[in-house]
Image: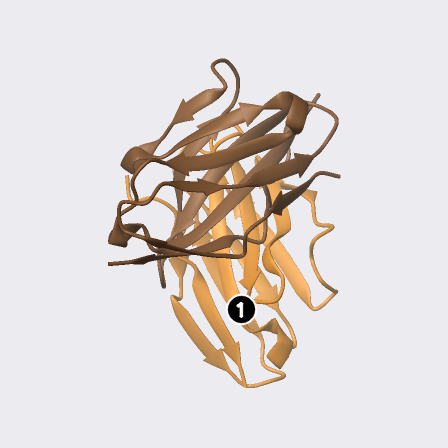
Amino acid sequence: AQSVSQHNHHVILSEAASLELGCNYSYGGTVNLFWYVQYPGQHLQLLLKYFSGDPLVKGIKGFEAEFIKSKFSFNLRKPSVQWSDTAEYFCAVNAISGGGADGLTFGKGTHLIIQP
Amino acid sequence: DAGVIQSPRHEVTEMGQEVTLRCKPISGHDYLFWYRQTMMRGLELLIYFNNNVPIDDSGMPEDRFSAKMPNASFSTLKIQPSEPRDSAVYFCASSGRGYGYTFGSGTRLTVV
């Protein structure tokens, strides 16, 4: 079974700082990778996803992530954060088997707080 | 498109009562997933369906939990009897190919 590890449980940054949230997964086969954001009291929204092709993926709100297969990593980045980026961020993976994709496995999440 | 619709948004019930959570997936999506979110355990996959058939229910915590999908546009997650430790936010998600997922707004369940 696959698993996802997010290195930072809580991150506090000032506005305009650069952001990188770490995500590593464990699974020997082919995977799809996702980053979701959850604003306080709301549901999960997709930031970006990687299925195949260019390992550098650009998502909404200025976020991007890079898939490094050799490191089993899919780190999320944003060059300049805003106060409105305060939220919980989840990395997720699903394994691709012969019959299709399984359900998503989520990391524990990173609580990001942006200080004005 | 109205997205994935869950009801109710909030549910408060007494221990021992039956609770039924409902989900309407996006039309045309053939995968449906039920997740539970708690502070302690994060997001856990409980069960998922493909073309209305349960594929993997290994995440269902115990026999008190059951899920059905009688047709392509409706699914229920039932807890009977409910216990305080079942308190959580329950999310339903649907997908068109099993690869991308759209989540509903969730049901916040409180069992007292």
Give percent across and percent down for residue B103.
43, 47
Judge whether residue A106 can be spotted in this image.
yes
**Vertical placement of B101 versus A43: above or below?**
above
Foreground pick, B46 / A78 = A78
Q: Residue at x 63, y 45 (%)?
A: A5
The amino acid beneath tag 1 is: Ala
Q: Quadrant of residue B66?
A: bottom right
Foreground pick, A100 / A5 = A5
Quadrant where the C terminus of chain B sits is: bottom right
Q: Residue at x 40, y 71 (%)?
A: B10
Q: Quadrant of residue B84?
A: bottom right
Q: Residue at x 59, y 48 (%)?
A: A7
Quadrant where the N terminus of chain B sits is: top left
Give percent across and percent down for residue B104.
40, 51
Label 1, secondary structure: give it.
strand
For chain B, the rendered hue is orange
For chain A, the rendered hue is brown
